[in-house]
Image: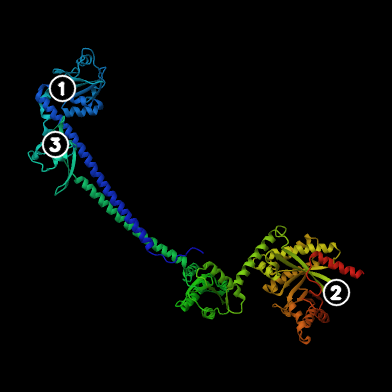
Amino acid sequence: MPSRYKKNLSLKYFVVPAIIILLTFATVSFLAIRGIRSSFYSLLEQQATQHAENYALQITKSTEAIEVINELLNDKLLTAMNSVSLIVDRIDNETLTVWADSLGIDEIYYYNQAGEILYSNQEHYLGWMSYPGHPVDDFRLSPEPFRIEDIRPDSESGILNKYSYVRTPEGFFQLGIRAIRLDTLVDAFEPNSLLTEMAHKTHVDTLYLLNSDRIVQSSSDPSLIGSRIEEPSLQEMLAPGEPQVMIKRLPEEGVYQVYTPVKLGDTTVGILGLTTSLAPTQRMSDQLTIFGLVAIAVIFGSLSHAVYITYKRKNQLLEMAYHDPNSGLPNRRSLLSTVLDNRQANTALLLAHVRNFDNINLVYGFHFGHTLFRALAQHVQASFADRYQVFHVAGNRFGFYVPTYLPKDELIALAKEVVEVLEEAIEEQGFKHQLDVRVAICDIPDPQADPEKIFANVSVALLHGETAEEPYIFFTPAMEEQLLRSDVIERELRRFLTDPQGEQAGRLWVEYQPIVDLTTNEVVYFEALTRMHLPGLGRIAPPEFIKIAEQQQLAVELGKWVLCESCKFLRQLREHGFDHILVSINISASDLLQTGFAKRMIDLVGQYQLTPQIINLEMTESTLMLDSDTANEVLQSLRAQGFCIAIDDFGTGYSSFARLEDLSVDIIKIDKFFVDKILTTDTERLVIGDLVRMCHRLGLKVVAEGVEEETQRQYLKEQGCDLMQGYLFSRPLLPADAIELLQSHRRSQLA
């Protein structure tokens, strides 16, 4: 069963996937935008928390520095030394520069044990080495963990500085404060200034320091100092001592508020608050949302357009696939689909063939033929569209599917109506005598039947209907069997003719039937008759396989093989001393009308060292009538070479005695039909004697075919017939048996 044919294209097959794709994209876009926005918020939260912790650490260190300054005003550098000792594990020029700026130190150097400057905020001193007698070298060599010097001029620049040193496991720091900045050192650690500077550097909106009562003590925004933060749960939130983040939505915009404790040792001295606006993040989120919506709209529009174009194109392709472009009718594929889709039992298919339409195309041109067939199609469609769907299944064939049960007589009536409608349309177009119509009918009892098989069956029936008396014919299983039989015969013929001595050897052979002189009873010549036997089919009648050979363009090859076999037989006759015996070979129209046939016959005879005079060529009347002028030219050429020409089955074709006078022939073989009449018809009404006498007047010899009774032989002899052929004397014989027959006759004469 073939796969189901598609004739209708549903829009849902395009819209549903498009909607699914769109929804999927929209969902993914929504989740992506939400994820990106969430990531931005999370990143902002992390940054804000980190800033708060760093700010709290700086405030803590600032507070510690202020307390040290308050206790030891002159010990500022000691505080700085304590501070820089905290970064011994992450020392680099940038870090020292940052710490120098944050601690209000002008110079900071880090030496190795040898007294070489490795890192500094003053990069032009990198690599400087201390020397004996220098204060730096004195500290390097001393056992002191730290040292603070009095104000002295720098040994390199001469600028007054106050230096201090502090030792580390791998080296030591040198810190310097210019004397002119000592007065501003305390101001640098003032909380409000520090918060303002930190807020400016980190682009935070506001930094403020709360006491335990949640009152703002210091702030980068002076207007907030003294205000109270109304957040009752703040103390509980900070109880674990970890930073806490809260999102607050103000009427005009959203903000992040981050709170983290500020500690001195284990004591919490305050709460650092950080406020940063969500407006940039919200703007970015809004932009992403707008971009996503625009992308969805663009994709939706593009997808909709693509779906529409694809749907329209698919419909056009389906229209082309299921309709004939010339007639506009549904085509063979559509018919097969219709048969397959129908689940009704006992339906039927009719196939109408407008015969000889190819001649119209050849004579008037294909454009004219298409126009003519289109007119026929419109006429048929107008007559049957209200009852049956009409299909254009081939160049000159219409299909009619009957989807419900109709008895045989109604199917016949429908077939006759189809013929009548088509012939009426043909007559209207002026081709009444050039075209006619045949209709084949195939019942479909099984709704599950293969449509291809049904179509093949009705086509086979149409082939058989070409020669039927009625213009309609029903398909029968015997037709299919005959088709299969013909296929087997054709394949076997092809295999044999490809290699006669191969595996197929013996499936075709030539027998020879004697043709006897009615007066002397002597064998004059043999007629070569081809025989065929196939496994499974048995003996195949010559008319059957010869017809198949002609239909399948194998007649020429078969004729060549028979000619070769006949020449071999003639050689055997000569070898046994029967030089006077001829062989008659049947020639088909394909052989006779093939270019160069006469020359090939001469070459073949020469190949076997024979003469044309011992070969008789037989052909039927119908062969000569296909192209009588050309055929007669070939016959004249063959007779001029010495071949004898005979017309086989005379009286059943289209010849007349007037035409015989113009043909280059030597022998007339009267068909068995007339010979059989001798046994059933009053002798006074027999015409065979007249046929013999008329042929003699034209100088032709006469052979009577199919003589099986002595009565027939005697009558033919009385009428002056020259030769006879038939079972009365002998059946066709194998070469060896034919030679034995001649030898036996010779022995009887000698005796």
Callout 1, which amino acid?
Leu
Q: On the image, which quarter does residue 110 sit in? A: top left
Residue carrying label 2: 521
Callout 3, which amino acid?
Ile
Q: Quadrant of the C terminus?
A: bottom right
Residue carrying label 3: 271
Residue carrying label 1: 78
Q: At which x and y percent is residue 304?
A: 34, 59
Element on which disc 1 rests: helix
Q: At which x and y percent is residue 725?
A: 79, 74
Query: Residue most toward the top?
Result: 133
Upstream in the sequence, badge 1 or badge 2? 1
Q: Image point 69% across, 61% down: which residue?
A: 496
Residue 313 appears in the rendering? yes
Q: At which x and y percent is residue 229?
A: 10, 42
Mark in the foreground, 1 or 2? 1
Q: At which x and y percent is residue 16?
A: 36, 60
Callout 2, which amino acid?
Asn
* Image vertical order of residue 320 relative to residue 156, above or below: below
Q: Image point 16% across, 27% down: which residue?
A: 103
Mark in the foreground, 3 or 1? 3
Residue at mark 1 to residue at mark 2: CA–CA distance: 157 Å
Element on which disc 3 rests: strand
Is residue 503 shown left or right of residue 21?
right
Is residue 487 shown left or right of residue 447?
right
Upstream in the sequence, badge 3 or badge 1? 1
